[in-house]
Image (cartoon, grey):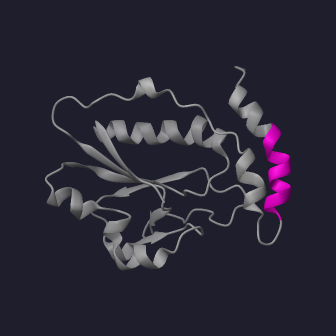
Amino acid sequence: MIRNEYRERWARWLPSALEALAHEPPDFPAVMPTFPPPGIDRRAFTLPRGELRMALLTSSGAYDTRSQAPFAAGAIIGDASHRTFDIDAPADDLQFAHEHFDRTHARSDLECVLPRNTLRDIGIKATNNIVSWSGYLLDWPSFIEVTLPQMLACLQSDNANAALIVPI
């Protein structure tokens, strides 16, 4: 097995974090200052070549209620999985499983979280699918090692060469 220094740092952080997060309400101020952020290789980012094909990604916990289970929004370390759904899914079939933002605004104006029509209105060709995950996420090793490669495979199969990330 290849040594993963980030996973090791995260594993050292987790026991005390779980103790603080188990309080009612969770003690986020005690946990977040010591959260070990992953490193980012900024050299990996390049400008798209040829026709722009924009992928829409959001950390709003959006999912299609017709075919997908909600994220485990109440999980103490979040839900490291993702959902992909058709960019043209009817707004009434979309829901948000994310307890850390007021979803009222997202429901009243879906464009503030999923700017599907805005991309079209400004002439940007979008991919066929939206990729979503729940922004409340403390299991970064699983997200980095499992979920991100799955998301990348989806983006590649959709022929995306750029991404608009809508963070929540």
Magenta-highlighted residues: 12-22
**Residue at 54% across, 42% down:** 147
Q: Is residue 14 left or right of residue 110?
A: right
Closer to us: 33 or 101: 33
- Which image quadrant for residue 45? top left
Give the vertical position of 8 relative to 122 (above or below): above
Point out the residue furthest to the top here.
Answer: 2
Magenta-colored stretch includes residue 108? no
Q: Is residue 70 left or right of residue 42?
A: right
Magenta-colored stretch includes residue 18? yes
Closer to us: 123 or 36: 36
Where residue 4 appears, as percent x and y from the top left, is 70, 26
**Residue at 82% across, 38% down:** 12
Question: Main structural element of the magenta stretch: helix, strand or loop?
Answer: helix
Is residue 65 shown to the viewer in this render? no
- The mark tally for this picture is 0
Give the vertical position of 46 relative to 84 (above or below): above
Where residue 8 appears, as percent x and y from the top left, is 76, 31
- Which image quadrant for residue 106? bottom left
Where residue 63 appears, as percent x and y from the top left, is 45, 64
Quarter of the image that includes the N terminus = top right
**Residue at 62% across, 53% down:** 137
Where residue 62 appears, as percent x and y from the top left, is 46, 63
**Residue at 80% across, 52% down:** 17
- Which image quadrant for residue 154? top left
